[in-house]
Amino acid sequence: MIELHNVSKVYPPNVVGLRDVSLHVKPGEFVSIVGQSGTGKTTLAKMLFAEERPTHGRVTIGGWDITAIRDRDVPLLRRQIGVVFQDFKLLPRKTVFENVAFALEVSGAPSRRIKEVVPQVLKIVNLHEKGRRYPGQLSGGEQQRVVIARSLVHRPKILVADEPTGNLDLVNTQEIVDLLKTINQFGTTVVLVTHNRDVVNALKKRVITLSGGEVSSDEEEGRYKV
Amino acid sequence: MTTLLRVFRFAFQNIMRNFWLSLITVSMMMFTLLSVNVLVALNLVADRAIAYVQDKVEVSVYFDSDVPEPRVVDAAGFLRGLEQVRDVSVITPDEALERFKERHARDETVLRSLEEIGKNPFGPTLVVKARHPGDFPFILEALDHPQFANDIRDKDFTDYQGVIDRIRETSDRARAFGIGLSVVFLMIAMLVVFNTVRMGIIIHREEISIMKLVGASSAFVRAPFLIEAILLSLIASALAVLVVVPLVALIDPGIGAFFDGASTIDLLGYYQVNGVALFLAQFVVLAGVSMLATGFAMRKYLRV
């Protein structure tokens, strides 16, 4: 599903983000990427949805080499990859329903499909009764669930979650992790970037540890060891 | 179709969320269009004023009172045969007398003098209109032909060339000023549009970044800004119509009166006939220029 082959990222003038990273993520896998701040976790995550391009090496998503993806093809890629961020990135003047629908609207989905899909994904994240609320009227965990709902509207094959629990308390963190596990059980490949030790250890899934921009360990049922 | 409607909706939202800036943009656009319309009206009035004065330029050829009518008709025929002559009309001695009396109806002294003469002192007159004011020297020279020269008592030619030159000079200056003003307004409007789009991009930065993240195409992100430029141009054009047309209707009688009621300077009629095409052309140019400014702003500030 995801293939990185000798990928390096060097920022001008000479700051190394990633160094010769090679990894393979199978379809339906749940992978946690861990490491200290500045070790290249977010750079790696951004490469998966073409927000960053590698300086060297090759990135392949579902057999599609996106190393030198054309600008006009980036939207097509992003409709196949759900993205969740720590800072939510919700539009405060749109309701929960409108925020989720926004992803479909800007992709040119017909209104009928929007009316059909949005309630479905809101139900998955258990927010179907709060569709008319605004982000400001929701808790942090609920806001993150809205973001997850938005990332699901295109029925993505991959979900990239970059520190999704970074701003959440323990209870909300657990809710989000459970939600990600549920989505993974539906068959979506989940790439979770985090430095939350408890979350990683509780998951008992594959853990890739980055250190200094390199893969320092890659374990099938790993634990957080930074 | 759905996508197009959404693009329009986003464009409309941009305008409303950025209301005051949109208002300034529309105002500047409208000033540009108003100055262009002043220029159009000025051109029209100047051209028609010159045509009006040119039409008034004529030579009156006074024949001796004893010249028989057939010779006057011959002279008229000769003049009509000249390429430089547009029109020749013959005024009989009786008509000349009547006109003279009408012209001096309030001048007792003149009328009494006329009575003292006891007979019609006027001979036949030819009123000659040339195609161009520059043709008059040639026509006057032609009348010196021996065949007619002895019958002609006097030739009266008012030199309107100076008047025409002054009108042309004044209108050229006003036109240059109008063009300058229009260009200045257009440049300001472009800068304002550029700034409006820049502000729009800054205000919608978050929204744009989310649009990109969730798979909006570059065209979809850009299109609302271009549509916004078109909508603002459309609003400005509509407002310009609402201002210009009543204004023209208001000043048109005044201009007509200034030119002695001449119907040739029918500014309102001109706008009635050509208004749609004129305002459409102005809208198209304004929208084109605004889209260009929007393009520059997006190129500089919108990374999609």
Image: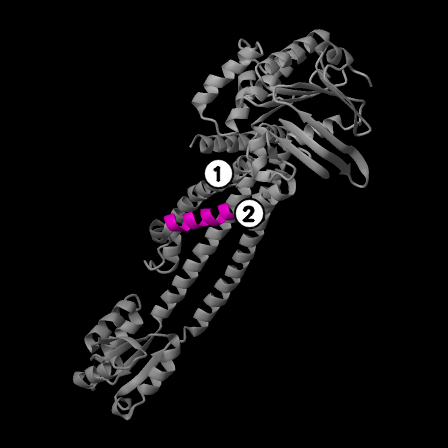
> Residue drawn 52% across and 33% down?
B11
Q: Which residue is mark 2?
A: B292
Residue A9 tag number: none
Write down the quadrant of residue A93 in the picture.
top right
Where residue A83 appears, as percent x and y from the top left, is 63, 24
Q: Residue at x 36, y 58 (%)?
A: B265
Q: Nearer the viewer, residue A184 or B62?
A: A184
Q: Which residues are magenta?
A: B276-288
Foreground residue among A28 and B297 = A28
Within 10 Å of the Cα at label 1, are there few (<14), some (14-19), or many (20+) other Cα atoms? some
Q: Which residue is mark 1?
A: B231
- Residue type at mark 1: give it: Leu
Please, what is the dominant secondary structure of the magenta stretch?
helix
Q: Is residue B279 magenta?
A: yes
Note whether B70 is above or below A161 in the view shown: below
Q: Secondary structure at mark 1?
A: helix
